[in-house]
Image (cartoon, coloured by chain):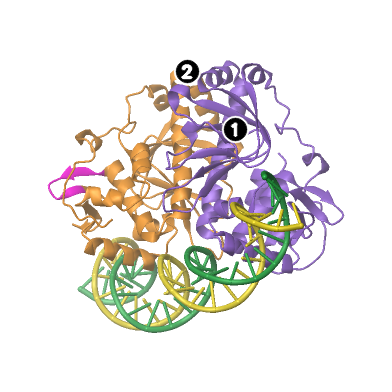
Chain colours: A orange, B purple, C yellow, D green
DNA sequence: TTCGATGCTTGATCCCGATCAAAGGTTTCT
DNA sequence: AGAAACCTTTGATCGGGATCAAGCATCGAA
């Protein structure tokens, strides 16, 4: 299980790094015309209103998350949103302290839910594409529940590294590398661990050679295969987060 | 927190017990014409194929669940499906040992995903209804992740009791009562607890007067308010599982 | 009725991750 | 630059739930 082979299989093709916001080239010109581009900096909140004034956000770049914080409970990061994802209030349960937050510098398109729905319904392709995307997000949500519910701390962290590697990684000589869009607290809240425990896990991974911090906020994964072996859901993650 | 008041507030109106499969009266005649009614007994599996032969199931009565069982990991019940819910492979991640199982006697409508998609697209109302339903299921999935990730064993169990009470309960003199559609093992797997621990929690709830087992498989919740107070997400559960 | 299989309960023990505490390190604001 | 606030690491200790094991109840089959 602790196979320390140094086989450096570039796991994702080069195009992933310069991947456009939408993964397949589909016509979102209609959306763009009716949407307001919104730029958000790290920690900035976006309104997540209910039906009458409901907005739909389509992520263009960066990373966002929905968080909940019940009084007396640790903050929870419930879901992560990547470029192409669709965010709206009706997809999220009505938890105490619910907010939509930009986790790093992001750009989104915002439009009223009404407009979004009618625009999407105007062409079958757009409809099909939106449904595909929403299905994928549903599957990701369920996978996350599975990870939280069944895996150990180490496995959860490995799962996140695989996810981020697939989404953001660029292959290099030292391994797959990327800028981490989440703070350590964010990661802990997403994995349902506390920051102290996460810090220990991180140190363990560094000692095992699965992880390096080049500069601050920049992570290198030198042994992709060993990382995949460190989580029971690597295949599922690859299917959901890998190139389509 | 342990308010042992015996106020017996009938939490759900009478119609809930004899509630039809779809909660609001909408026209699913079109679906019914193209679907094959399928009856399943407890523990029976239903095919959950990928795209070319993908089926869509619409739950008519009973309770189903999607389960995963990675080798070396305990079985997990990832999601519960109630009457009106839509089940299809693309909504679920590709986890090892994935199966769709009837948890008690159920009836579903099965139809090819293709047919379902075109049927749904034929009228705006059906489209809107399906989207509403899928959004709700997404929200429930996220809520489940939140429960698994942030709550204690007692709170998780209380949450499930509230959910089942809202879905299946009929008010009576002794309190809200219903036949439990899940085995103890099912419940443990759904709440990410092990059966031993669940048994202890159950005993504790009985001792606190929150729970009674009238006959086998029949549960009475004598103190609805106290039960609601036992989970931080009671409001969220009521919003998602209560009468619409 | 007896047998076997399965599932539920309860006790004893263990372990992973939480919690508490203290000591650096970073970022941000003035 | 200096100070304050926040974040990260690491050690020591604690606790909730897992695990193991034994006893008991339930159920179906012959």
Report the front residue among B231 and C14: C14
Per the rendered image, the range of residues in magenta is A169-176
> Which quarter of the figure is the N terminus of chain A placed in?
bottom left
The answer, for residue A181, to whether it is visible in the render is: no
**Marks 2 & 1 on one chain:** no
Q: Residues within 10 Å of mark 1 (few under 14, many from 20)?
A: some
The residue at the far left in this view is A173
Q: Is residue B46 left or right of residue A209?
A: right
Residue B95 at what x, y percent from top left? Answer: 43, 42
Compared with B172, B151 (above or below) is: below
User: On residue B100, which mark appears?
Assistant: none
Compared with B174, B58 (above or below) is: above
The answer, for residue A157, to whether it is visible in the render is: yes
Compared with A152, A103 (above or below) is: above
Residue occupying image coordinates x 60% and y 26%: B128
Could you tell me which chain the residue with mark 1 belongs to?
A: B
Residue B122 at what x, y percent from top left? Answer: 58, 16
Taking the magenta stretch, the answer to whether it contains residue A170 is: yes
Q: Quarter of the image holding residue A30? A: top left
Residue A113 at what x, y percent from top left? Answer: 53, 32
Residue under label 2, please give it. Answer: A124
Residue occupying image coordinates x 73% and y 28%: B25
User: On residue B132, which mark appears?
Assistant: 1
Q: Residues within 10 Å of mark 2 (few under 14, many from 20)?
A: few
Magenta: main secondary structure equals strand
């Amino acid at each position: 299980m602790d196979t320390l082979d140094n086989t450096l299989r570039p796991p994702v093709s080069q195009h992933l790094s310069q991947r456009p916001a939408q993964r397949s080239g589909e016509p979102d010109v209609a959306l763009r015309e009716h949407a307001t581009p919104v730029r958000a900096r790290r920690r900035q909140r976006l309104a997540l209103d209910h039906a009458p004034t409901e907005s739909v956000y389509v992520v263009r770049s960066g990373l966002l998350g929905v968080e909940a914080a019940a009084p007396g409970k640790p903050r929870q990061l419930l879901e992560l949103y990547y470029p192409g994802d669709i965010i709206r209030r009706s997809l999220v349960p009505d938890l105490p302290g619910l907010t939509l937050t930009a986790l790093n510098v992001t750009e989104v398109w915002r439009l009223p839910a009404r407009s979004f729905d009618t625009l999407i319904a105007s062409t079958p392709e757009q409809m099909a594409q939106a449904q595909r995307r929403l299905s994928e997000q549903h599957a990701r949500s369920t996978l996350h529940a599975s990870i939280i519910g069944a895996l150990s701390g180490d496995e959860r962290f490995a799962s996140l590294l695989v996810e981020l590697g697939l989404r953001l990684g660029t292959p290099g000589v030292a391994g797959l590398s990327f800028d981490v869009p989440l703070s350590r607290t964010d990661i802990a809240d997403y994995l349902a661990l506390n920051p102290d425990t996460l810090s220990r896990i991180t140190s363990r991974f560094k000692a095992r050679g699965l992880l390096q911090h080049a500069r601050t906020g920049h992570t290198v994964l030198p042994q992709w295969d060993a990382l995949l072996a460190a989580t029971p859901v690597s295949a599922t993650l690859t299917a959901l987060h890998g190139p389509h």
